Amino acid sequence: MMEGRKDSFLKTYRELLTPVPSLLAREFTHSGYTYGEVFKLAAGIRKNLGVGASPKNICLCSTNKAVVAACVLASLSGSCRVVLPYSFSAHALAEMRETIDFNLAIADHPEEMPPGVDVFTPLPGNDDIHPGALKPPDEPFLYLFTGGSTGRPRIWSKTPRNLLSEAFYLKEKFSLSDRDLFVATVPPYHIYGLLFSVLVPLVSGAGVMPDIYTFPQEIISTVNKHQASVLVSVPIHYRVLKVDNLSVSSLRLAFSSAGSLDRDDSLFFYEKTGLGITEIYGSTETGGVATRSISEKTEAWKPFDVVQWKLSGGRLAVKSDFVSREMTKDQDGFYLTGDEARKERNNRFVLLGRADGIVKVAGKRVDLTDIQNKIKKLPTVNDAAVLHLPTDKGRESIIAAVVACDLTETHLRKLLTDMLEPYAVPRLLKIVPHIPRTAAGKIDRRWLEKLFP
C-alpha cells in the first residue's frame, strides 16, 4: 500500500511540472496571471539563476501569489531553494540570515534587505516551460521559518513529498477543481497560506484572488462579487466577520487554521451561512494533521486518512509524509508534538492544550490556554493573551495577562477572581487597545514580553 502511494505521488509530481495545454490558458490569479504565465515566470527564474548550476538559496519576500507559485515551480526543478521568512522586517531578515545563508532575494520592498543581498525581479523566460528535471522527492527544496509567536525563529525544511503530497491530498479530500476560486485573508509566505492560497489551487487548476483581504466588508464583498467558492482565513478574521450582513452564498468551503477557532465565532458563521468552518489542526513542522467542524457537533478532531497518530506520555505523536525531517522521531517513526491530547471514539482525539502551556503556580498545574479562553468570554473583551514569567523559585511561574477590552483593571481583576481559582488569577494585568498579531494571525510573543521587562 505504501509503495503504491509513493508511485502515485511520483506520477502526480511529474504531471504538475508538465502541464497540459488546456491548463495554460486558465487564470491562476484572477485578472492577473494565467497558468501559462506562471510557468513562463518559473522558466525566467531558472534562466536568471543559470540552468544546471548548483541551486542557490533565494529569500522570497513577496505576497504576489503568482510569483510565489513560480518560485516554487523553479525550486521543484532544482534551480534554487526557496527561503520563506516569518516577517519581512529588516531585523527578522537579518536574524534569519544567521540561520541559513542567502545572498539573493525576490522582494516587494527591496530596501529592507540585509547588506550583501542582491534583489532581482523575476521576468518571463522564453525557454520551454517544462523544466526537464525534477528535484528528488525527499530532498529539501524549501525552508520555512516560524517566529513572532514562539520567540527565537526556527527553520524547518520541506521536501517535495512533504508539501505536494499534502496539497494533492487536500485537493482530493475536498474535491477541489478548476471550478473553484479561492479568497485568502492570510499571506502566502506562511505554511497555511502557502498551502491553501498557492499550492492547493495550483495542483487543482483553480483560481485565486490576488490580494490579501482582512477587513470584514472587504472579505464579504470580494467573495460575493466574484462568486468565490473557498475562503481561507484565521480565527481573528472570523471574529471580525461577526457582522449582521454576513452573507456568502457562493462559498462551499471555509477553512481556518493557525490557532483554535472560538466556538461562538464558529457558531455565528454557521448560523448565518449554513456552512460549518473546517478547522485544520497542524503546524509548520508537522503539516496538516486533522480537521473538525462545528457542523459535526463535536470538539474532537478527525485525523487525515494519511496521518497515523498515537499518545505518548499524554502527548500527541504523528506519522505522515507531511512532517519535516528536523522533527525527532521514535523507533516507529512517530514525531512527538507539543500538544497534550486524549483519545475519543471513532479514532478521534481531543486536544488538552500545549504541553509547554502547562505551568506550576503555588505547586498547582495551570493551563494558560484555558485561562486565555475564559478571559475572551468576558464582556467587552476583544482579545487576550496569557503568558508565564519565570521567577527566582526555579520551576514556579508568575502568570501575566494582556487584555484588549473596555473594562478597568479593577473590574477585570474582580471578574477574574470570581471566575478562576486563586492561584490561576494573573498576578500581572495590562489593558491595551489591541494586541498585535503576526500576518498569520498569531499573537506577537516578543511584543508581549516587552510589556513585562
Image: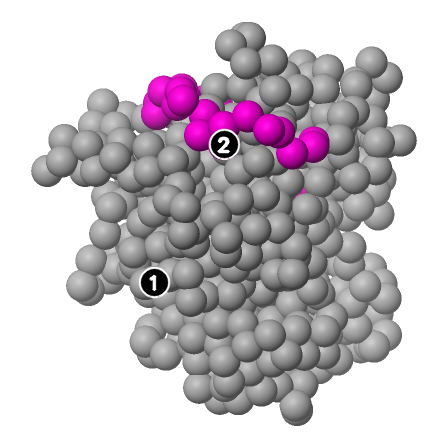
Q: Nearer the viewer, residue 382 or 26?
A: 26
Up the image or down, 160 lies above or below 429; here it is above
Q: Quadrant of residue 371?
A: bottom right
Judging depth in this view, the residue of 334 and 234 nearest the camera is: 234
Q: Which residues are magenta?
A: 122-150
Give the residue at x 25% y 28%.
333
Compute the Cα span from label 1 to label 2.
29 Å
Q: Secondary structure at mark 2?
A: loop
The residue at 36%/53% (across/down) is 170
Query: Left or right of 425: which side holds 10?
Result: left
Residue at 36% in and 20% down = 136
Sequence-earlier tag: 1 or 2? 2
Please name the colour scheme applied to the rendered image.
one colour
Which residue position is annotated with label 1? 174
Q: Which labelled disc corresponds to residue 129?
A: 2
Task: Indicate the amino acid at tag 2.
Answer: Ile
Residue 136 falls inside the magenta stretch: yes
Badge 2 crowding class, 10 Å Cα cut-off, few under 14, some 14 to 19, many 20 or more, is many
Percent across and percent down for residue 212 are 69, 58
Q: Amino acid at mark 1?
A: Phe
